[in-house]
Image (spheres, rainbow, N blue to C red):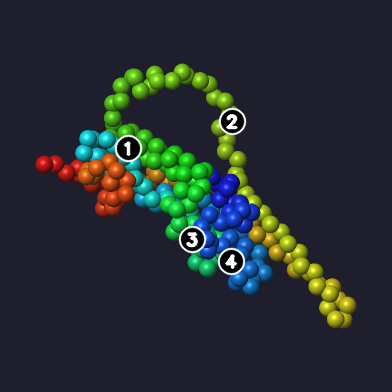
Amino acid sequence: ADYHLKELSFGAYDQPVLGMRSCLEITANQDSEETWTAREWFVVRKASVHTSEDNVLVPALQMGVEAREQIFGPHGQEDAHITRPDHPLVQYAENFTHYFDLITERKSVVFQLREVAKASILAKYLLECGADLGEAWFNMGEESGPVCCLEVPQLWNEQARTHIEVQRDGQITNFDNFHGLYGGVDFGINRFRLGTPSSSVAAGRAVLGRPASSLMASRSTG
């Protein structure tokens, strides 16, 4: 999902929603030749756990994409203290977030990422409330050893362009332009305290219903 996000950001494929523009198209429309580097990543913006009438736990969330402008510091690339709102990648991240639910219906990799986020939220809730699941839940599959390296490589996409002009006096001038895109997936669910689930009328409506006003909302009784 993260790899495909960077491909879409640079316009390697058609945008999933009509009218969306890649960050390079946004840069071209700004008529700017500036060089920039930035990073973007998937993030969970809101998270909660609901219960249905038959006491089924249903995770609910809102996801999006965030972007930060980067600068070259003494230790390599670092986040800029302030990211301007008209930065091309920031604008693309805002558009992607606006159409996120629609994009999940059209891009299977984004849909699967959202399902992983839901499972992570539900697992975090079970840990925080100290749920006793019983040994049967841990014996449903065969134990297997590690099959891959645990290090996650950083994904990036870079584009460089050189524009050469010959002046009337015969002088040759050139302009170098570089755009770098970096990032990954950081759900950020550690900042949520899921505590007690909020009750909902039905499981089907719990997913689409309004999120609880507080992630620590008490379950209603009576």
Mark 1 = which residue?
125
Q: Residue 172 has which mark?
A: none
- Residue 54, relative to residue 198: is it above or below? above
Q: Could you tell me how far apart the alpha carbons at marks 3 and 4 are, in whole angstroms?
A: 12 Å
Mark 3 and 4 residues: CB-CB less than 8 Å, in contact? Answer: no
- Of all residues shown, which one is farthest toward the right? 170
Q: Earlier in the sequence, mark 3 or mark 4?
A: 4
Q: Earlier in the sequence, mark 1 or mark 4?
A: 4
- Of all residues shown, which one is farthest toward the bottom? 169
Q: Residue 106, percent across and down?
A: 49, 49
Q: Residue 173, percent across and down?
A: 81, 72
Mark 3 = which residue?
95
Q: Residue 209, percent across and down?
A: 29, 50
- Name the element at disc 1: helix
Tag 4: amino acid: Ile
Mark 4 = which residue?
26
Q: Residue at x 33, y 41 (%)?
A: 59
Q: Could you tell me how far apart the alpha carbons at marks 3 and 2 are, in whole angstroms?
A: 34 Å
Tag 1: amino acid: Tyr
Quick one: label 2, few (<14), some, or many (20+) residues within 10 Å?
A: few
Q: Is residue 154 left or right of residue 82?
A: right
Q: Earlier in the sequence, mark 3 or mark 1?
A: 3
